[in-house]
Image (cartoon, grey):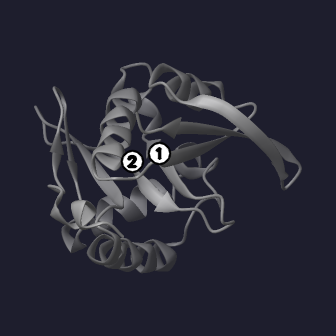
Amino acid sequence: MTSALLRAPRTINTARLSLLPPGPEHLDDLIRLKGDERAFGLMLHGVRSPERAREELEDDMEFWLVRGYGTWSVFERGSGAFLGICGLMERPDGRGVALRFALWPECRGKGYAREAAKAALEFGHRAGLSRIIAVARETNMASRGVLGDIGMRECGEFRHQGHRMLVFESLAA
């Protein structure tokens, strides 16, 4: 891990959003989000039980301490409403550091996922990550659109549980 990652500010504010590293105060929101099929059904390993969401929160907090990056809880700045998650994580299949995001379905069509994903991608590159990938199911046109709009390009594919998965990448300039 580079020292730049450990020195980078961990909170991101965009025009409309606040991205905060997750903490215990976010647990109830994360349990609701990760347990909702509409929000988390397309994520790797699908919806989570409350117990698994709690374990993942602990893992996410530890990941921030060790790596200097991770998943943020995403909030609307104006209202303080919890919108979902967005962040950078090591893929368990060894493909590398991946951008991921999952927001409430009610947030779709408002540009929140695009705004959060762009901020997370820029954070990663500023902090020294030279290559960041993202994976989207071929049929997930919304996520594919977000990834293309923030400058990620398709670079590969694989099959997962019978689905064609597309790999996107962003290389630091």
Say what amino acid the circle numbered 1 marks: Ala
Front position in the image: 49 or 5: 5
Say what amino acid the circle numbered 2 marks: Cys
Answer yes or no: is residue 165 visible.
no
Label pair 1/2, CB-CB below 8 angstroms: yes
Q: Check the image and name the residue furthest to the right.
A: 162
Relative to 51, is 83 on the left or the right? left
Determine the residue positioned at 46% across, 73% down.
Answer: 50
Residue that numbered label 1 is attached to: 102
Q: Earlier in the sequence, mark 1 or mark 2?
A: 2
Residue that numbered label 2 is attached to: 86
Q: Nearer the viewer, mark 1 or mark 2?
A: 2
Q: Check the image and name the residue furthest to the left.
A: 78
- Of the numbered discs in the image, which one, if any, rests on residue 67? none
Quadrant showing the N terminus = bottom left
Report x, y in % for residue 114: 40, 28
Determine the residue positioned at 34% across, 71% down.
Answer: 67
